[in-house]
Image: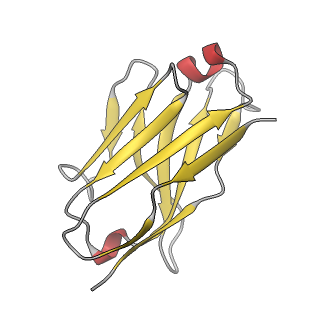
Amino acid sequence: QVQLVESGGGLVQPGGSLRLSCTASGISGIIFDLSTVAWYRQGPGNQRELVASVHSSHSANYADSVKGRFTISRDNHKKTVSMQMNGLKPADTGVYYCNTNYAADAHKNYWGQGIQVTVSS
């Protein structure tokens, strides 16, 4: 059974930083290596949105709202994906979800349970 476990969330003041991490277990190394890994978030009253993703080639993409503030990275050896979040704003508040997606098999799309990030003074 594949599990994605997120950590690093919490309460931070505007302008502060947090680092989210997600560790995958129960997934083969080759599938993780070939998967796109990503962070999504769902703010209060909003739909879940893509925040950042990193392809198996290690190329990264970001939502316009977080470009220049967030950095996503992956460690295939450890099967982890992390996201450094700097310059946090109240609009970044939400539940953040880790996702791994192996495009060649629709059944190999996995989600973490989510972790709360609250940006407030």
Report the colour scheme: secondary structure
Residue at point 44%, 26% (across, down): 75
Residue 105, picture quadrant: top right
Residue 30 lies left or right of residue 55; in this view the side is right
Q: Position of residue 104 (x, y in %)?
A: 66, 20
Residue at point 32%, 82% (across, down): 120
Quadrant (top left/top right/bottom left/bottom right) for the N terminus: top right
Q: Which residue lies furthest to the right in this view?
A: 1
Quadrant (top left/top right/bottom left/bottom right) for the C terminus: bottom left
Q: Residue furthest bottom?
A: 121
- Does 20 appear above or below 44? above
Asked whether residue 70 is in view, the answer is yes
Q: Position of residue 50 (x, y in %)?
A: 45, 52
> Disc count in the image?
0
Residue 9 lies left or right of residue 16; in this view the side is right
Asked whether residue 63 is in view, the answer is no
Which sits in the foreground, 40 or 22?
A: 22
- Does 61 appear above or below 13? above
Q: Where is residue 112 in the image (x, y as percent from the top left)?
A: 64, 50
Which sits in the foreground, 11 or 94?
A: 11
Residue at point 62%, 35% (across, down): 24
- Does 82 appear above or below 101? below
Q: Where is residue 77 in the image (x, y as percent from the top left)?
A: 51, 19
Q: Residue furthest top?
A: 30
Residue 109 lies left or right of residue 107; in this view the side is left
Residue 15 lies left or right of residue 8; in this view the side is left
Residue at point 45%, 62% (across, down): 9
- Does 105 appear above or below 101? above
